Image (cartoon, rainbow, N blue to C red):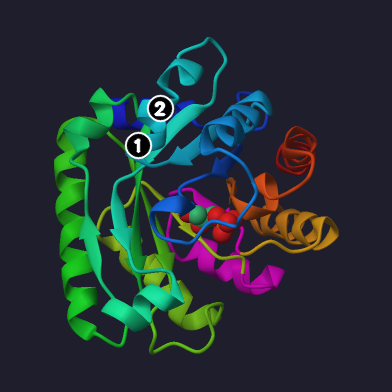
């Protein structure tokens, strides 16, 4: 077993073999809702809920390194890139993608894994060429130092109307798997059989489901359950966790769904 596999398995719960991961990497690419408080106190609450991992950017990891250094703290998944996700930013500067952190830096910052976007169907087709090359290069460098890479395969490009269209999304996930992703992060497409087909099509690597914008707790819990029923290895949920009134209680509920 390689260092990469050892690190990837650290993300999984020892009983269920699955993971509830909280994404808190939004501030780098999206406007944050006013009044939700300091990112440091939010991150401390997230850590208190004891998810298996937290997806964050370099800056917040630097500010909260001590909280991740205590025994039993969640594993760190470092967001290693940036893109224009916000519609105002897209209107202002167009679609763009850059990787920001090298695999060696991710390791030295304490990351167990890194996460990078692969954004399907941008209007600016050149962006996809850059995106796929940068992710593939990152994977090849990361594997030299034993760092697993989660590729976030999406249809967030401006050419696309339906971000959950199963066949083009299945293709994006397959591309991510083919360029060497160790795990995939992608949408729950809203139908268990469709999601199963997408998960099956990437082979043997784990697929984690992302959350999307905040909805009612009932809807978020339902789509989380369906994603797990489809065969997802876990959740990487953000706004439905840290925009909730009771962050720790919400993580506990998602953990029950994932580890049932
Ligand atoms: O994809 C994510 C951020 O990287 C997950 O966060 P959301 O659940 O808020 O969409």
Q: Which residues are magenta?
A: 189-212
Ligand 1 quadrant assignment: bottom right
| 183 lies above or below 66 | below
The residue located at (46%, 61%) in the rendering is: 30
Left or right of 115 in this view: 27: right
| 259 lies above or below 25 | above
Left or right of 182 in this view: 21: right
Would you identify the image quadrant in which residue 216 lies?
bottom right
Residue ID for mark 1? 59
Mark pair 2, 1: CA separation: 6 Å
The residue located at (25%, 71%) in the rendering is: 96
The spot of residue 124 in percent (x, y) is: 24, 85
Can the viewer see residue 17 in this picture? no
Q: Quadrant of the N terminus?
A: top left
Residue ID for mark 2? 63
Q: Residues within 10 Å of mark 1 (few under 14, many from 20)?
A: few
Queried on whether the Cβ of the residue with tag 1 lies below 8 angstroms from ligand 1, the answer reads no
């Amino acid at each position: 077993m390689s260092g990469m596999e050892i690190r990837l398995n650290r993300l999984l719960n020892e009983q269920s073999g699955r993971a509830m991961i909280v994404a808190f990497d939004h501030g780098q690419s999206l406007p944050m809702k006013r009044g939700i408080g300091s990112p440091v106190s939010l991150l401390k609450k997230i850590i208190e809920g004891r998810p298996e991992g937290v997806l964050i950017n370099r800056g917040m990891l630097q500010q909260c390194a001590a909280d991740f250094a205590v025994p039993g703290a969640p594993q760190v998944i470092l967001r290693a890139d940036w893109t224009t996700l916000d519609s105002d930013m897209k209107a202002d500067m167009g679609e763009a993608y850059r990787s920001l952190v090298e695999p060696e830096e991710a390791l030295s910052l304490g990351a167990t894994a890194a996460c990078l976007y692969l954004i399907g169907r941008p209007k600016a087709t050149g962006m996809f060429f850059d995106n796929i090359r940068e992710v593939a290069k990152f994977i090849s460098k990361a594997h030299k130092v034993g760092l697993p890479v989660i590729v976030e395969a999406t249809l967030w490009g401006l050419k696309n109307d339906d971000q959950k269209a199963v066949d083009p999304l299945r293709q994006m996930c397959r591309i991510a798997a083919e360029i060497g992703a160790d795990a995939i992060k992608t949408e729950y497409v809203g139908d268990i059989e469709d999601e199963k087909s997408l998960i099956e099509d990437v082979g043997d690597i784990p697929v984690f489901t992302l959350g999307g914008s905040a909805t009612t707790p009932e809807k978020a819990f339902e789509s989380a359950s369906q994603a797990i029923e489809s065969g997802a290895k876990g959740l990487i949920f953000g706004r439905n966790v840290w925009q909730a009134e009771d962050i720790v209680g919400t993580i506990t509920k998602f953990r029950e769904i994932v580890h049932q």
